[in-house]
Structures are given as structure tokens and as C-alpha cells.
Image (cartoon, rainbow, N blue to C red):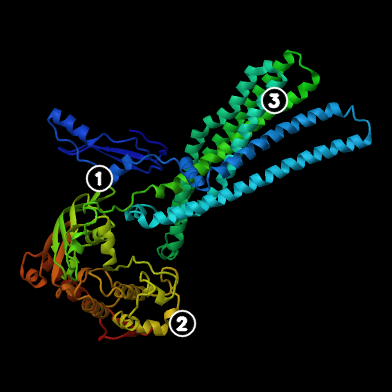
Amino acid sequence: EGAAMIPQDCWIVREAPADGEEENVFVRGAVLVRARGRRSAEGDESRAAGEGEAGPSPASREVQAALREKPTRPLRDLLGFLRADGWLTVTALIVGLMLAAAGVLAEAVLFRGLLDLSRSLGLGIQRIGMMAAVIAFAVALMLLELPVFAGLLRLGRRLEARFRMAFLEKLPRLNDDYLRSRPTSDMAERCHMLHVLRNLPGLGAVFFRSCFAVVLTTLGILWLDPGCLVPVVVTAVASVVLPLLVQPLLAERDLRMRTHAGALSRFYLDAMIGLTPIRSHGAETTVRREHEGLLTEWARSGLGLQRAAVAADATLSLAGFALAAWVLLAHVARQGEQANILLLAYWALHLPMLGQAIAAAARQYPGTRNIALRLMEPLGALEEESSTTAAAGERPPSERKERRRGAAIRFDNVTVRAAGHTILEDVNLAIESGLHVAIVGASGAGKSTLVGVLLGWRRPAAGVVRVDGEELKGDCIRRLRRRTAWVDPAVQLWNRPLLANLRYGLGRDRPLATTAILCAADLHSLVESLPDGLQTTLGEGGAFLSGGEGQRVRFGRALARAKADLVILDEPFRGLDRPRRRNLLQEARRWWREATMLCITHDIDATRDFDRVVVVDGGHVVETGKPDELLRRPDSRYRLLADAEAALREGQWSGIGWRRLTMVDGVLQEGREATVR
């Protein structure tokens, strides 16, 4: 029903609905879209029922929660952090700001009095006393300013520290979909901008002090000439209100520029990570063009912000000085005293200056507010649900009885959608406790999403997943994660020693069967080659290791959970040669022989001795059963995959046109007896 900040290259496509389907609108290339709401499904259904039509399907839980979510108000939320210090500190600072503003007004009155007093002071000692009084007054103002600004600095540091603590407390509770839907560079840029929050109290102090000064200056002018009530009040109100009226315009352009800056920072991060592939594929021209497009959009948005800011400043200055001239002319028309004209002129011209100070603070506020808004967004994001099905004090089904090794898993009519695309649809699957199941299928069939539901990556849009009879959500997901060993190339390796990477996720007091794990994961040769053995740091993301070595380290970390009830292996030995893959897979099945194991692999031949095979195609479980039984069926999808793999190995890779090279301990060997890896 409404949108904001859509660039010129944005495409909005309205898709005509098919019979019985809801109308869809696709937005591409938008910087920011604001949805004002969605018509309730109940209202649509009742309206459709009256017309004899079927109503639209209800929105997903995430969309419904987003529509129910209250709009973020950064200033109010940040004030909540400031209240942790109590109102005494804030009140003392406000009083100090009011006294400082009053001091500036008194300073003008003092200097006005010096003009008359200087003619009456003839003695040198009297002039020295007058100078001493002026110096004492200036020192008093300085002594008042110092504690105020010191308090503002402390308040800013505390605000930043409290926000960082709140962010760190929120991070473990964030839904995984939230982090997976945001670019890493964007989240890193938000965290980097946290230091801007410490400037917010100072920005607010400038604004409130200027507003206090406007009020006091207005009272001072009325004290000099009460007849200037109308022009003075109009000038004072305009000095405060006009800067605030232009804020929506500046805020929109500032957020547009910051959004483009976030896209630009993501480009730089991606370019640095993929620098070698870019050079290898000769893609410098393509990257340069993409950078040029992003830079052009960022520069255009920045130029638009500067134009709006300059136009706003010019308008405010002209309006302020015109109103100040009105005040002076109104006073002169009443033939005010000559001495008062100088003081009144000073205060009248001071009002536009205060308005400019308010405008400068107000101009900085949209940027600070947008930064705070982006920082506040994770704090208001959806958290993982807590199970509420069990009654208070009642144990979940998995704990009411003596739990056996291995997790029993059941998918009932499960559908998973992401970004409007259906990844899994109407999946029905039951896996008994302790079974070793191989999941096979073409790339993009939905295999990783199937196991990702168990890890909490995806939430079913329809249907129910149960583990040991309990619906998989909230606390059940958290308990299952503690019972799960997971091996995947996406598992992060940290820039820490090898031993610390193997122990990652274990308690300090929990023992680690280091020798057995090194043997099972085939890491002995790696440890011997490292300069400091187990204490050798692995580099950022395991940069000092090869791809195969990194996979074995990930496998070793999972082996530390020897008593896991669920084992998920998603292409666990990618980058290793065939014999080593087979040996490590056999070791994994021996290590977790009592656990339920789900192994995703494209190596069909390695799945022949599994307890069960699940074939996934196009988001559907199309086949399941024992491998030998499926291989005997001529119409089996699993048999087609096995035959295709055998034909490729025997017909393609065994051809005489291939040279067979083997790398052994850093030495490249060639021979007919070498095995294709």
C-alpha cells in the first residue's frame, strides 16, 4: 500500500494471478521499501466467501510477525539505555545546559552595561576591578561548561557500552534466517558504526542548549521592547520549527546514501575475497563496470543529500535574517533608545545564529538516527521460539522416558519457502532412531535444506517436523543442536591453534580424546607437518590449510561429540581423493554407529551399504528405501543415478585420452597405474 525510496532503475512487476491463486507483486532493484500493511486474511476470506471465491492463503509466520512488529523508534529506545544511569544524571546535565544558555544571555547584558559603566569609572583601580569582575564571570562560565561536557562524554561512552552489551546478548538468540538474509559486509558495517552512538548525547545537548538560548533571547528582547511581541515570537518559533520541518527530506536522502554505501562496502569485501578468481577469469572489466554502477548511485545519492542540505541552510538563513530585520525595524519604528538598539540588534541577529545551530544539529540527526535505526534493527528481530506446548513443569517427550541413542525424525507434509521460492514441498519422511541414511539427488534438489530444517536454518511454512515425538521448534531445536554433530564445508575454522579448533564448542572441563580423534580424522600427518603441532594457528578461515585438510579438521571437531544422537554430514569430505573419502566415511559410521546419521553426498557408489537411501528431486522426496532393493528395481531413480555415475566413470574417465597424475607428498607422479582421484 505504500513505498519509499525507490530508485529510478527499480522494477515493480505485477503478476496476474492464476485461477485460485493470490496476486503477487515483485519488486526488483529497490533500495528500501516500506510496507504499510497487508489486508487481513480473515477479511479477504469473508469477502471472498460472500463473492463465492476462495480467499488467499495466509502469510507466513515471519511475514505476520513483521507486520505486527511495532515501528522502531531509535530515539526512544536509546533514551531507554540512558535511563539506566537514573534521571539524576540527565536532570543535572539539563540544568547545566540551561545555566550555560542563561550565562550567554547574561554575558550580553554585562557587556551592554559596560558601555554605560565605563563612562562612570574614572579611577584606574575601578577599571581594574571591572576587568577582574569580567574575567571572574568568564571563568565561572568555563567552570560550568567543563563538567557539563565531561558528563556528556561519559554518558555517550556508557550509551555505547550498554548498546554493545545488548547487541551481544541478542546475537545468540537471533533467528538464523535473519543473519542468512543479510550480507556479512552490511552487518559488519553496522557494528563498525557503533562508535557514532557516543556522539548522540553531545548532539542532543547542542540542540537543547540552542532551544533554551532561543527562549531566553526571546524573553530578553521582550524585556527591552515588549511591543515587538509578534515579530519576536514569529522569529523564535521559525528558528526552531523550520529546521525540524526539513528533517524528513534530509532523512530520506541520508538513508538512501547510507544504503548505497553499504552496497559499496559489500562490493569491496567481495572483491577482496574473490581477488584471485577475478584475475584468473579475466573479469576485471566486469568488476570495474559493477563498481562504476554502484559508485555512480552512491555519488548521485550523496549529491542529492548535499543539494538538499545546502538548499535547506540557505532557506533557513534567509528566513532567519529577514525575520531579525523585521524585529529591528519594528523597534526602530517605535523610536527605541539608541543604547538599547545595539543590544536588541545583537539578540535579534543572535536568533538566526541559534537557528543555524539548531539546523546543524538537526542536519546531523538524520544520519545519526539512520545509523541508530540500522543498529536497532537486530535488537528487534525475531528470536528463536520457545516451546509452549508443554505444560509448566512438564518435561518434553524426549525427557519423560529414558532416552535411547539416536534421534527419531519425522516430516509430515513439510513445505519450506525462502524469498518467495518453494524449496521443499509436501515432504513426508520418517527416519527411525539409529538409522544411517544417505540423501542423494541432483544439485539444487533441496537436500541441504532438508537437513537445514533440523538445524533450525529454515522454518516450515507448512507441516510439522518432530524429533523423538516432539515438535521441532524453540527449546526442542536448542536441545537437538546440543545432541548433533555437524560436518559441512560452511563450518567456520577460526584463526586459532589447531587444538582450540578441535575443542571449539566443548566446555573447558570436558575431556578430549585427542589421539583417537587425530587417528579417526587422519590428522596425524597434518600435525607432524605443522611447525608448532597442535598449537599452530590455522589462519583466518583456515587459510593456512588446504581444502582437504580443512575438511578433516572440521570432521575432527565433530568427532569430539562422540555421544551425539544426530549426525549430519553434508558433503563432509569434499576435496579428498576417493579412497580417503571412503575410509573417513567408514570411520564416521563406526564412530557414530548408534546415532542417527544423515549423509548428503553425490558419490552414489559410497551409499550402497547405508541402511537407507532418500532420493530428493525438485524439492520432493521421490524415493526412499534400502539401497540393494532400489538397485533391483528397473524404474528406480536411485538406480538411474548409480548407472549414470558408473557410465561416467567407465566410459569417460577410463578413456585412453586421459593422462593420470598423482600427487604424493608434494611430488607429482604419472603412470598408467595411477588411480583417477
Under circle 1, the secondary element is loop
Left or right of residue 39, residue 499 in this image: right
Residue annotated with mark 1 = 60
Q: Are marks 3 and 2 in contact (CB under 8 Å)?
A: no
Residue 532 is tagged as: 2
The residue under label 3 is which amino acid type?
Answer: Gly
* Viewer-proximal residue among 266 and 357: 357
* Viewer-proximal residue among 660 and 565: 565
Residue 610 is tagged as: none
Can you give x and y, in whole percent of width and height, for residue 587 in the image? Answer: 24, 79
* Viewer-proximal residue among 263 and 503: 503
Mark yes or no: residue 266 visible: no
Can you give x and y, in whole percent of width and height, for residue 437 in the image? Answer: 17, 69
Task: Please tell me which of labels 3 and 2 falls first in the chain.
Answer: 3
Quadrant into which the C terminus falls: bottom left
Q: Is the residue marked by circle 2 packed among few (<14), some (14-19), or many (20+) residues within 10 Å? A: few
Q: Residue 669, relative to residue 14: is it above or below?
A: below
Q: Are marks 3 and 1 in contact (CB under 8 Å)?
A: no
Disc 3 versus disc 2: distance between alpha carbons? Answer: 77 Å
Disc 3 versus disc 1: distance between alpha carbons? Answer: 61 Å
Left or right of residue 193, residue 410 in this image: left
Task: Please tell me which of labels 2 and 1 falls first in the chain.
Answer: 1
Residue 220 is tagged as: 3
The residue under label 2 is which amino acid type?
Answer: Asp
